[in-house]
Image (spheres, rainbow, N blue to C red):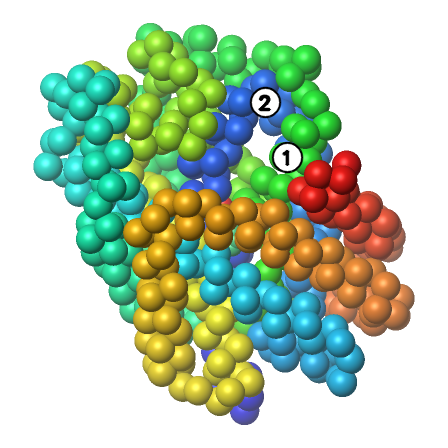
Amino acid sequence: MQILARGNWSGAVGFILAAMGSAVGLGNIWRYPYITGQYGGAAFILLYIACVFAVGIPLLLAESLIGRKTQRNPVGAFRVLRPGSEWVVAGRLSVVSSFVILSYYAVVAGWVLHYVYLSLIKSFAGKSPQEIATLFTGMIASPWLQIFWLMVFMLLTILIISRGVSRGIEIGNKIMMPLLFALLVVLLLYAIQTDGAATGLEFLLRPQWQKLSPTAVLEALGQALFSLSLGMGIMITYGSYLSHQSNLVGCAFFVAIGDTLVAILAGFVVFPLVFSFGLEPSAGPGLIFQTLPIAFAQLPAGYWVSLAFFVLLGFAALTSSISLLEVVCAYFVDEQRWSRKKASWTLGIVIFLLGIPSAVGDDFLEFMDGLATNYLLPIGALLIALFTGWALTHDERREEFSAGESSAFRFASWSFLIRFVSPVALVLIFLHQLRLF
Ligand code: PHE
């Protein structure tokens, strides 16, 4: 009865697409290329892949196993597994993190919608780099414009979530994810035949080992957590709509490899364009909004390329934002017995209001981003790793892992990674944030 009321995926594919939709987001297409640019191309990519395998996949598995086992939201999940214990704090933290992240993520996603609009009305064509930069600063300086697009984006998110798990989230992802991949391939084919393609590919493929510092290692690890949507109960929530027969190990690999591939391919789209127009590869966060439109303004068929690019980014952001709103909604539906409609509209509106300060003053957006990525996510991920590795017994872990997966070697490797490697890596990230390491 409980499970029927909550909803379910129609099958493993529904879960994989939704989890990949959550994972693939602004982090892959906006953040990943510019940090790769800052930390030395191929060397950073290799490091990133190592982090995904050593920490990302084990945590993704831990979260989705907890969800599948309990069939509950993050708070309910810890309550079911360790009733009356303090572990429920880890679940509450997930719900808080989702509120915080969605409030500013939706502001940046609103910028993307504005850039879809700017692309549509041909705002970049014929403009000088200076004028294009002004489009961005002008947008940042206009609170009403940002609030308007924030509202549009939150409305889209609410509309999908209010339709439920299989009719909303699953259908939304089944439509948007294939389109996203198709757009990415089209952009890739376009980018690799521009003049700067050879330099761009060389920049990405030739490792610059000297740029790999301890900071780069921690940056790669933090990016892996953020990019795979870990440490905030999303995979617990999405895993809770899975049936017990599903092969979670296979799903986790699929999601992580798909997410990493999109990030790497996004780099192959961005850097050829950057080098074709002599732009700065380490331009930082402005790379997508200020640098790329300069290329779009001059490219043949630039109108279509920029439209495709920002629509791609918009889909990626929307499939991530629905996963954030779902964590919060699942908590109110399961624990407070709200209807899904009431939960999605009420919480969506609260998050919209919370987003307004980020839209009005950009220092606040940075503050919220710092709070989430430097503190909430690493702490959340650490608690989940410690819970899975140390609070659950060996038999509990074994039993849930073995449903749908029988390899003893895989279980032993996962156990080792989640008990030792993940906690140590996460504590290091945290100490680094506190400037103690
Ligand atoms: N994984 C998303 C991205 O790469 C961001 C995200 C983080 C989404 C945490 C949900 C939760 O953009």
Q: CA distance from mark 1 to mark 2?
A: 9 Å
> Where is residue 274 shown, x and y percent of the image?
37, 17
Q: Say which of 116 and 195 sits in front.
A: 116
> Residue placed at 45% from the left, 27% from the top?
284
* Quarter of the rendering containing residue 124: top left
Quarter in which the N terminus is drawn: bottom right
Q: What kind of element bears circle 2?
A: loop
Q: Secondary structure at mark 1?
A: helix
Identity, as a three-letter code, of the amino acid under mark 1: Ala
Q: Nearer the viewer, residue 266 or 382?
A: 382
Task: Say which residue appears at 44% left-offset and 18% top-offset.
Answer: 281
In the rendered image, residue 24, in percent from the top left (x then y), is placed at 47, 46
The tally of labels here is 2
Looking at the image, do the residues carrying marks 1 and 2 touch, with CB atoms under 8 Å apart?
yes
Q: Is residue 425 left or right of residue 200?
A: right
Mark 2 belongs to which amino acid?
A: Tyr
Which residue carries the number 2 mark?
A: 39
Residue position marked by numbered label 1 in the rendering: 220
